[in-house]
Amino acid sequence: MIAVVQFPGSNDDRDLRFALKTVLGVRSELVWHRQGELPAETAGVCLPGGFSYGDYLRCGAMARYSPVMAAVRRFAEAGGPVLGVCNGFQVLCESGLLPGALVRNHHLHFVCDFVHLRVEKSAAPFTSRARPGQLLRIPIKHGEGAYFAEPDLLARLEQRGQILLRYADAEGRVSDAANPNGSVGNAAGVANERGNVFGLMPHPEHAVEEAIGGRDGLVLLGSLVDALAGGRRVP
Amino acid sequence: MKALSAASAGREPVVDAALAREHGLSDAEYASILALLGRPPTFPELGIFSVMWSEHCSYKSSKQYLRTLPSRGPQVLFGPGENAGAVRIGDGLAVVFKIESHNHPSFIEPRQGAATGVGGILRDVFTMGARPLASLDSLRFGPLEDPRHQYLLHGVVAGIGGYGNPVGVATVGGEATFHECYRGNILVNAFNLGLVEEDRIFLAKAAGVGNPVIYVGSKTGRDGIHGASLLASAEFDEESEAKRPTVQVGDPFTEKCLIEACLELMRTDAIVGIQDMGAAGLTCSSFEMASNAGTGIELDLDRVPQRETGMTPTELLLSESQERMLLVARAGQEERVREIFERWELEAVVVGRVAEGGRMRVRWRGGTVVDIPVDPVARSSPELDRPRREPADLGERQKLDLAALAPEDDPQGALEALLDHPDLGSKAWIWRQYDQLVQGGTVIGPGGDAALVRVRREDGTPTEKGLALAVDCNPRWCWLDPYAGTAAAVAEAARNVACTGARPLALTNCLNFGSPERPEIMWEFAEATRGLADAAAALGTPVVSGNVSFYNETSGRAIYPTPTVAAVGLLEPWRRHAVSHFPRAGLAVLLLGEAREELGGSAWLAVRRGLELGHPPAVDLGHERRLQRLLAEAVARGLALSAHDVSDGGLAVALAECAFTGTEPIGVAVTLPDRLRPEALLFGESTGRVVVASALPEALLALAREGGVPARQVGETGGRRLRVAASAGATWIDADLSHLRGIWAAALPRRLTAA
């Protein structure tokens, strides 16, 4: 069972659960942010997109203090897989479960568009379904999605292979022109050192049906589902 | 009356006819208030009459015309009179939708004005129990050469995105155009559609004497007081900037929580009726709820959650603070209501009771400050039959001598100039700033003829149903001929919906006009509503909701009549739909409908000749109906893979858009029979025409013959160029698609020069 955390202001929780249930056939449960414990049978945790607490103060800054985040931290420290999408990524950075920070897009506008992502590493539990270098077409929609890390931190992340996804062009070239928000190193998705906590600004749950945004998001969500199924590939 | 005068003594001024005039009430209206009450109103009562009888709330100048609009049909569950229209889409589901203006506030404070416009329309939809699913926006600005209008565009777009994105409702389409006539009055019309189970629709009814009246949502402040009466019901002048404090401030986070809390509560049986506090806030909502149920309400203002100290009864009654709702619960369910709202960190306070006797009694600090009958205020608001007069220069406007018009010597240059015009160029700069995807149903997003949204039930179960949504109006046509222009807006909105393959179900409209106190404006309004009624009836698409915005004028200069029409259509199964761009090479290109020698009111005439003259193109409603039926049938049978309506800029622009708006450019070569002058063939805007790409042209031609729709194959797709030639041999246009696309894509951003 995957726990989908609901903060006041979460918006993409329903879409994430739809992708998990209707498309991937996995059970999920909505966990209210004030709950101090995750349900006993939680095998993975997803923090959905949206505007928790209206993103007032700073994106994710208030949600990190929700009681459920202490439980998520314990779950992550025990090695459980935690995925943060968009606002969920912001919450994970604010909580210190992921390194770096997300700041205002360099062009200062909210941007909603389909982008190309280059998968940098194929690894469980988030990118095992991809091969390195594979291109995914997945939408972004955010105003504060520019990933920021100090140069030495960025160098460490590069060295340890924690940047799992980068913004690229349709040919797979990682360039400034293909960077939609000013993220350092074109980073679109970043994992912790252990590899069990992963945050990304693009929305895989909005690319799970052929006729509505394509199915490239299933590469990422499907990897998580496979990992929970003990490495068995789930359709 | 002792209590009344005591409560307001010392704090609030004495009411007389002069004060009433300051509140926007005429002497005749003040006289009927005196007759109704048998005494002078208290100051809070005067405030109530002032807003309830304002043009904005009472529709006093427009009522008699709105009654003529067709609003019934087997698909209609609730029409005008409710917060929004509700239409059946089958299998127990219904859609609830409406479009509404927020013009005046957006001109004064673009970001908050547009944001609260979105917030207001969302509340109209979820008040009825529907989860808001998709939004559209129709925006009109002055010329972008004016830095103020760049600022307004930036502000309005930031406001729409800044509210719609956090609240979790996708903005899936809309329109934006720019014209001198909006320099003093921009238009911001916001549309929203929500989904509901048809037996779970809630109405604004204060039924059941003794039931608690519960206030939920944000606290009340001093914002937006007299927004409806003073801001929306008068024209602008040099001092309008001073009205900025009458604009409300939006909080999308609270709205999001309010949506979730209300929908959660609506799944219980605790609610009897519910109404949002929009224009005129607590006053309007309580009067409407009591009036709809034939009851009265007793309100205790001391219990109203307040975020400022020292608020007077008038301020509490008239505040337009956002994100507030009033609901009537079953007696004994108060705790349940409070629990749900507390979970979402929102106020839920019992502020009154439903009472017998049809009176509104408002208490404050131990005294009664309002004691008036409900129905005369809510229903018997004055109705005006304002004088109408055809504009003296109408004949001049409509005069266009085609024979005297110099021929277009550079058709390709004309196409490029049209694609570069901000009205016709890409609006991606705008809609990239909106979340187009949330709630996972966007099959076709902004940029096509209509948006297409797949329906999922509240529990997430996907359905086969798709909803097609479009919003349209050509103000230039409406200025030249408001009857024909409005009929054309209806035809185009419905045609755009039909281009996806959907069957148009119903309409909503936002009628934006100048001051009704001028006979020429009233004539425009009467003509426009006549056009709306005739077209809606002919196409079988009832008008189920709408809004009138008068006084869109500044220092005596009115906007062009702008009756914005939004159409909603149903497509089942949604997977079988047509897109607006050519999907691939090797397809036959067909033109449905016929061109006539019509250049009056065209974009070509305006852009290339600097003229806004002539009769707009004729609308043949019988042909429209046949054409729209044919489109649905052709898409269902797989005979039309793409369909794109020919509108602004004519066939040349339509073909260019078909060719370059897909992910990959798909070229096209077209040959046109040159029986009309080339300008009319290439750039004329004759209505009822659609460009279709088909792999089975013979079958489509046969179907068109059967359906009584003129159709012919004019070319085929392939290559990377747009080629348009005359059958006599002359080549009018031969251009590289990436070149044309570049011009079109830059049209808006290249004009946004102000920092």
Image (cartoon, rainbow, N blue to C red):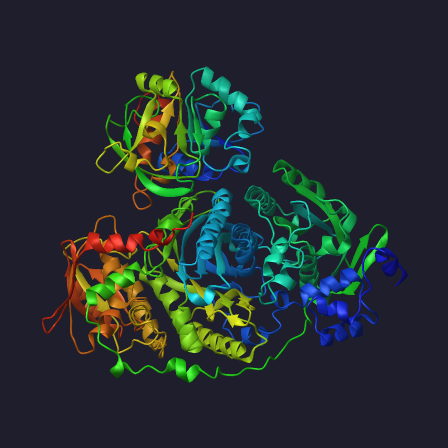
Q: Taking B134 as reference, is A199 above or below it?
A: above
Percent position (x, y) of residue A62? Answer: 56, 30
Percent position (x, y) of residue B99? Answer: 50, 60
The quarter of the displayed image where residue B43 is located: bottom right
The quarter of the displayed image where residue B66 is located: bottom right
Q: Tell which residue pokes out farthest to the left in this image.
A: B729
Percent position (x, y) of residue B684? Answer: 27, 72
Q: Can residue B700 be seen here? A: no
Q: Please tell me which residue is depicted at 29% across the width and 77% down the height of the picture.
A: B598
Q: Please tell me which residue is depicted at 42% across the width and 71% down the height of the picture.
A: B540
Total labels drawn: 0
Asked whether B218 or A23 is in front, the reply is B218
Judge left or right: residue B630 versus residue B7: left
Judge left or right: residue B175 versus residue B348: left
Q: Tell which residue pokes out farthest to the right in this image.
A: B2
Q: Taking B587 as reference, is A52 above or below it?
A: above
Q: Can residue B623 be seen here? A: yes
Percent position (x, y) of residue A187? Answer: 34, 28
Q: Taking A157 as reference, is B272 above or below it?
A: below
The quarter of the displayed image where residue B461 is located: top left
Asked whether B151 or B336 is in front, the reply is B151
Judge left or right: residue B684 versus residue B373: left
Q: Taking B173 as reference, is A201 above or below it?
A: above
Q: Quadrant of the N terminus of chain B?
A: bottom right
